Amino acid sequence: MLRIAVPNKGALAEPASAMLQEAGYRQRKDRRELVLMDGDNQVEFFFLRPRDIAVYVGSGKLDIGITGRDLLLDSGSEAEEIMQLGFGASTLRYATRPGGVREVTEFSGLTVATSFAGVVGKHLADHGVNASVVSLDGAVETAIQLGVADVIADVVETGTTLRQAGLEIIGEPVLRSEAVVIRRHGAPQDDPKVRQFLRRMQGVLVARRYVMMDYDIRAEAVERAVALTPGLESPTVSPLHDRGWVAVRSMVPAEDAQRIMDDLYDLGARAILTTTIHACRI
């Protein structure tokens, strides 16, 4: 069986489980379940702390896992990213009191507090900065007020929490992260079970980005219409019972669907419909 690590809690847990369900895999109904067997798909899921997943996968105990890029890089484990999953986006940024240092090159001799000591330590080393790194397990924004650090590096979404703590974001992002699929460095790349899993996940990503569009249009306008809806390979064009009319079916980006419908209508298309795609293979 393919052994897969999945986040058991935190911001990545529910989106990861939802994506796996869309890909056709069983998921746990009770949060207390730590192991779930999906015999139909020959997969065994292990629900672990997100920060531990890269360690288990890197050690070879589990085949693949879903975790954050930040957690993967911070772990220092023998694991690598093999697919981006499009959710769980975050940014690791430096922050300090207003009027203090402004750039990472000014951190020499200072103390930086963070929950991502591995990532931050490497970032400082890459910039030739000799600073102390203090590893904390949460509530990093209070480290400066309590005198533990001069600068912090924390995950930022809106920056509201940092501003409430009297801090301001400085410098460029340390890291941009999102949920990713990982595997052990050097693992066979032609494993059919892993390839099948990745195809399913890729199918979910495509299905989320596209909708199926159907419309009727006069035959003389079909070339201009299909230029708006080229599809992934080529649209399907079928003659209708009424001579001179054809039906067109094509996948279009969901975010552009309303604009495309307007443009098709202006070309004379009618009965324009969009439907959600639940699964696909590209």
Image (tube, helix red, strand yellow):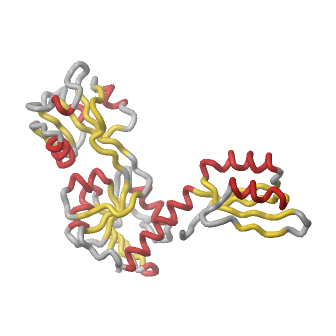
Does residue 40 lie above or below 34 as drawn? below
Q: Quadrant of the N terminus?
A: bottom left
Q: Residue at x 60, y 63 (%)?
A: 232
Q: Residue at x 18, y 57 (%)?
A: 76
Q: Nearer the viewer, residue 151 or 11?
A: 151
Q: Is residue 51 visible?
A: yes
How many numbered marks have been drawn onto this rendered protein structure?
A: 0
Residue 171: quarter of image: top left
Q: Residue at x 40, y 80 (%)?
A: 42
**In the image, farthest residue toward the right:** 242
Q: Nearer the viewer, residue 166 or 83?
A: 83
Q: Indicate left or right for 258 with 197 as reference.
A: right
Percent of width and height locating residue 156: 34, 38
Percent of width and height locating residue 240: 85, 68
Does residue 158 lie above or below 282 as drawn? above
Residue 271: quarter of image: bottom right
**In the image, farthest residue toward the top:** 99
Percent of width and height locating residue 161: 33, 31
Q: Nearer the viewer, residue 196 or 235?
A: 235
Q: Is residue 143 visible?
A: no
Does residue 254 lie above or below 279 as drawn? above
Residue 175: quarter of image: top left
Q: Quadrant of the C terminus?
A: bottom right
Q: Residue at x 16, y 29 (%)?
A: 106
Q: Indicate left or right for 26 with 106 as reference.
A: right
Percent of width and height locating residue 62: 27, 71
